[in-house]
Image: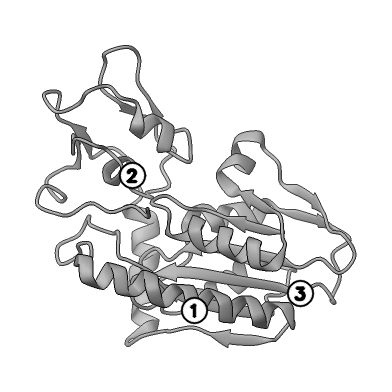
């Protein structure tokens, strides 16, 4: 079984493609949270996979919270477990952080998959050019196929791009990000642009946004900071304070 979390679609595509290549069932972590489903029974020989985006050189915090609650029946030391994390460039020490979050579950293999950038909240961060976006998507196909092959063989392997200054990125910046940059209080809606289409409500994986009638969207403090609401708004009515006003928009098509 493969558990995944995704906001703008990169990790959903990666997880879905892996599931198809491996013949595995796919479980959306957002739906597991909604139904409070944290206990799963493994079939004989079944592997466990986790696919998620990299957030500021660490695992998406919502995934860390999920695996702290998860319980597997029939798990043993022979169960093969792996992670695959999508990233714009590199992932720092995400594997170390993930292994610690898993607790008694052993992560046997880890992979990073470079995908188009979607983080736009800080200065210096924006989406990729269309040319680079298409190049990353094209390269990702072969990368996923290679990863699937190794998973089938239960290859124990750490195949990731840590990048430069990995310790500072993951041990200093990531904790700061997780603590101080996960708030939804700065999301703002332009009333003259909002058409009340409900795209933000429907695409929020955490069911954190509501909209009644012709009112503007409201956020309720359970944000995963996936930015699906910003990137998937068809009229660019949603911004994050002033940080995103001149930034691009992206979601996997």
Dot 3 lies on which element?
A: loop
In the rendering, at what x and y percent does residue 207 appear?
Answer: 47, 33
Label 2–label 1 contact, CB within 8 A: no
Comparing labels 3 and 1, the label whose residue is closer to the camera: 1
Q: Where, by quadrant of the figure, is residue 158 drawn?
A: bottom right
Name the residue: 63% across, 87% down. Answer: 157
Query: Looking at the picture, how far across and down is residue 118, in whole percent?
Result: 30, 59
Query: Where does label 2 land, which residue?
Result: 183
The disc label shown at residue 142, or none: 1
10 Å crowding of disc 1: few (<14), some (14-19), many (20+): few
Residue 199 location, x and y as percent?
Answer: 35, 32
Q: Which mark is residue 26?
A: none
Q: Is residue 154 visible?
A: yes
Locate the N terminus by quadrant. bottom right
CA gap, disc 2 to disc 1? Answer: 36 Å
Q: Secondary structure at mark 2?
A: loop
- Mark 3 or 1, nearer chain start: 3
Residue at the spot 19% in from the left edge and 62% down from the top edge: 126
**Dot 2, crowdedness within 10 Å: few (<14), some or many (≥20)?**
some
Residue 41 coordinates in the image, percent (x, y): 84, 53
Measure how far apart labels 3 and 1 are at the Cα level. Answer: 22 Å
- Residue depicted at x 65% and y 50%: 27
Judged by depth in the image, the label closer to the viewer, 2 or 3, is 3
In front of the other: 239 or 137: 137
Front residue of 25/124: it is 25
Q: Quadrant of residue 218?
A: top left
Dot 3 corresponds to which residue?
A: 80
Foreground: 157 or 106? 157
Q: CA distance from mark 2 to mark 3?
A: 35 Å
204 is higher (above) or lower (below) than 126: above
Mark in the foreground, 2 or 1: 1
* In this rendering, position of residue 23 left or right of residue 242: right
């Amino acid at each position: 079984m493969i558990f995944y979390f995704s906001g703008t679609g990169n990790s959903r595509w990666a997880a879905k493609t892996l599931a198809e290549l491996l013949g595995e069932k796919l479980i959306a972590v957002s739906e597991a949270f909604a139904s409070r489903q944290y206990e799963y029974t493994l079939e004989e020989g079944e592997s466990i996979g986790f696919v998620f985006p990299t957030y500021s050189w660490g695992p998406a915090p919502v995934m860390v919270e999920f695996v702290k609650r998860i319980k597997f029946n029939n798990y043993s030391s022979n169960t093969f477990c792996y992670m695959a994390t999508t990233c714009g460039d590199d992932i720092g020490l995400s594997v170390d952080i993930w292994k610690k979050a898993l607790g008694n579950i052993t992560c046997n293999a880890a992979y990073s998959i470079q995908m188009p950038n979607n983080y736009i909240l800080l200065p210096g961060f924006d989406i990729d050019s269309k040319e680079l976006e298409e190049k990353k998507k094209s390269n990702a196909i072969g990368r996923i196929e290679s990863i699937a092959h190794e998973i089938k063989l239960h290859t124990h392997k750490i195949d990731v791009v840590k990048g430069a200054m990995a310790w500072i990125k993951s041990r200093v910046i990531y904790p700061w990000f997780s603590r101080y940059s996960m708030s939804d209080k700065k999301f703002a809606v332009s009333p003259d642009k909002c058409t009340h289409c409900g795209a933000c409500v429907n695409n929020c994986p955490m069911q954190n946004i509501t909209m009644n009638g012709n009112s503007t969207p409201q956020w309720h403090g359970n944000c995963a900071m996936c930015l699906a609401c910003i990137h998937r708004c068809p009229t660019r009515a949603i911004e994050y304070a002033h940080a995103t006003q001149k930034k691009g928009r992206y979601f996997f098509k």
